[in-house]
Image (cartoon, helix red, strand yellow):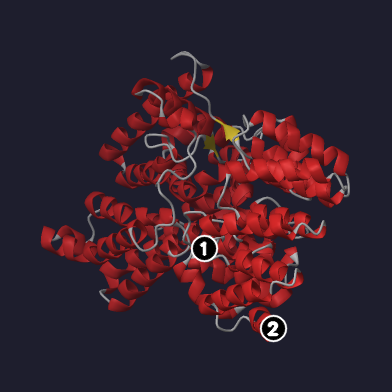
Amino acid sequence: MTFLQKKYSIFLNSLTTRKVLVFLLAIGLVVYVNSFINDMFWDDYDSVVNNQYIRSWQYLPNYFSENLTAGAGIHDNYWRPLLLISFSVDYGIGGIEPFFYHFQNFFWHLVASLLVFLIGLKLSKKLLTGFLASLFFLVHPLQTEAVTYVAGRADPMHTALMLGSFFLFLHYPSSGKNFHLFWSLLLFILAILTKERAIILPFILTAYILLIPLNIYTQNWKQKILLLAPYFTIAAIYALLRLTLLHFANTFDLGAQTILRSATLWQKMLVFLAGLGTYAKLILWPDKLYMEKVLPIPDSFFAPMVLLGIISLVLSIFLIWQSFKKNKLIAFCLLSFFATLLPSMYIYPIQGLLYEHWLYPAFPWLFLAIAFSLSKYLNDEKSTKLVPSAYFAIILLAIISAFSLRTIIRNQDWQNPIKFYEKNISLNGVSGRVYTNLGMAYDDAHLPGKAIQTYQKAINISGNTLFQPWYDMANTLGQLGKIDTAIDAYNQAIKLNPNFAPNYTNLAKIYADQKDFKQAIAVLQNAEKFNPHQISILYAIAAISSNSGDFATAKIYAQKILDLDPTNQQAKDLLLK
């Protein structure tokens, strides 16, 4: 036995659950501690900074009845009440100080990593298997989009809750205690209250029962169905609510670009393969990491990413087929990986973009499959003769170290918005949204000239389909005193999005500042047609009417506000005038 093999043997024999947990905590802090001081930007503004609902627990009922960013005056089709509660906890501790938000993101990522370890240990009965799976999951650079980005919290949070539910489910057959089943169901409910994609869990549990016969699972179908029934019932109730009472948009297509909606079946297949190829490349070689990766329709079947996607698909099918014969745990994990990733693979296009964070909830299963395979390799005498286990461990250590360093470097890209967006654009992460956000960052840095130029680029790139750059440019022009061009920009923003209340209130303020109260009221009353229950619009009408001497109209709108919110003090003050 060589010196390295002896050291490796000593390491394995000294490995304990406690040591693994402590090591994961330590390496997690080393890799992510530099993210704790990063700024908040992009969707952080809508989810946190401008979200009035997280600032007071009086809005708690709104978390469960309205969409995610309703507190910022934005209409979307996301319903994530538990995520809002987590943001409220951060706000209660430290206001909008970024440290607390970043730390909680890291906390959920660490919990998810520890659960990957515990699940790997439970399924394989080997510490090394769980350790390897959790370590890859903890440090892989693609995780930064979900962990370092505050608004990405839904991914580590709902994944941790899903894994917790699965882990407790694993204990139920051997314990027979309803305690494990109850808490598993509760964690599943909490997971779907955090992010919609947690609804996949019952299907993962079904695959497990069918592939891995243990205790109660080996008995009749009736018992299997009774065990799974509560999970599917919860999922069905959730789906029904989201289709009806908690559906906040006219479509379930969460932002997919028209190019994908109108594509032919052949084109969608090419996009699917290109997406799979892109994911495979990023997993193996995470070099160019940036947000808003546009996934255009490939020109041909022989496009590089399409070919890589074909290779990845064929190889995956082969591995799953072989695993069915030799190790069903690997087959189960690979199937769970693809089932979790499926909503992002353009069979039904949710987005025309490709995001790194979509891999987050799928990664536990992929890294568990890899860890099971590595464990099998290390226990195979023929394989270890080819590459001794000690040398193989050094190779794994080098890969994990490289991934850790890449994650630390990637965290630095998220330090502040200007650095982030400029880096994004330099790596071809070009979209109307990116340029709009960069323009806002220039605005915040008191660089209005660069901001206006950047908004114009956003308008040109998006083909004049986004209202946001027009709205933000109008704000900047107004601050510079360029009133006529600001008015034109606000009108264009209103044309593109007549439901966004600040378009109207800011335009009305310009007219009111010029003492053109009649035009200001006309703008706001037009807004009322689209937003009849928007208090900011009703209050603007009441306030401008009062300032212009039209107290009768002011009182009418003050009463409308009180009908919607009887505690509104500003409306009460207007009634007293």
Secondary element at image label 2: helix
Q: Which of 340 and 267 lies nearest the eye of the viewer?
A: 267
Quadrant in which residue 394 is drawn = top right
Residue annotated with mark 2: 573
For the N terminus, give its image quadrant. top right
Q: What is the CA distance from the residue labelled 2 to the residue labelled 1?
A: 21 Å
Q: Is residue 20 visible?
A: no
- Asked where in the image residue 380 lies, by quadrant, the reply is top left
Residue 42 horizontal side relative to residue 238, left or right: right
Is the residue 479 above or below the residue 268 in the image? below
> Which badge, 2 or 1, is on the more N-terminal residue?
1
Q: Residues within 10 Å of mark 1 (few under 14, many from 20)?
A: few
Q: Is residue 577 left or right of residue 120?
A: right
The quadrant of the image that shows the C terminus is bottom right
Residue 72 visible? The answer is yes
Q: Which residue is mark 1?
A: 532
Q: Amino acid at mark 2?
A: Asp
Q: Residue 448: image x %, image y %?
A: 86, 44
When asked about the image quadrant of residue 55, the answer is: bottom right
Who's the residue at 59% across and 69% down the image?
Answer: 535
Above or below for 352 versus 225: above
Marks 2 and 1 in Cβ contact (< 8 Å): no
Image coordinates for residue 470, horizontal then vertical, percent: 70, 41
Question: Going 19% across and 64% down the picture, which residue do you hit?
Answer: 216
Q: Of helix, strand and loop, which one carries label 1?
A: loop
- The residue positioned 11% from the left and 62% from the top of the image is 222
Residue 320 vertical placement versus 160 (above, below): above
Q: Amino acid at mark 1?
A: Pro
Please tell me how crowded label 2 is: few (under 14), some (14-19), or many (20+) other residues with Cα within 10 Å: few
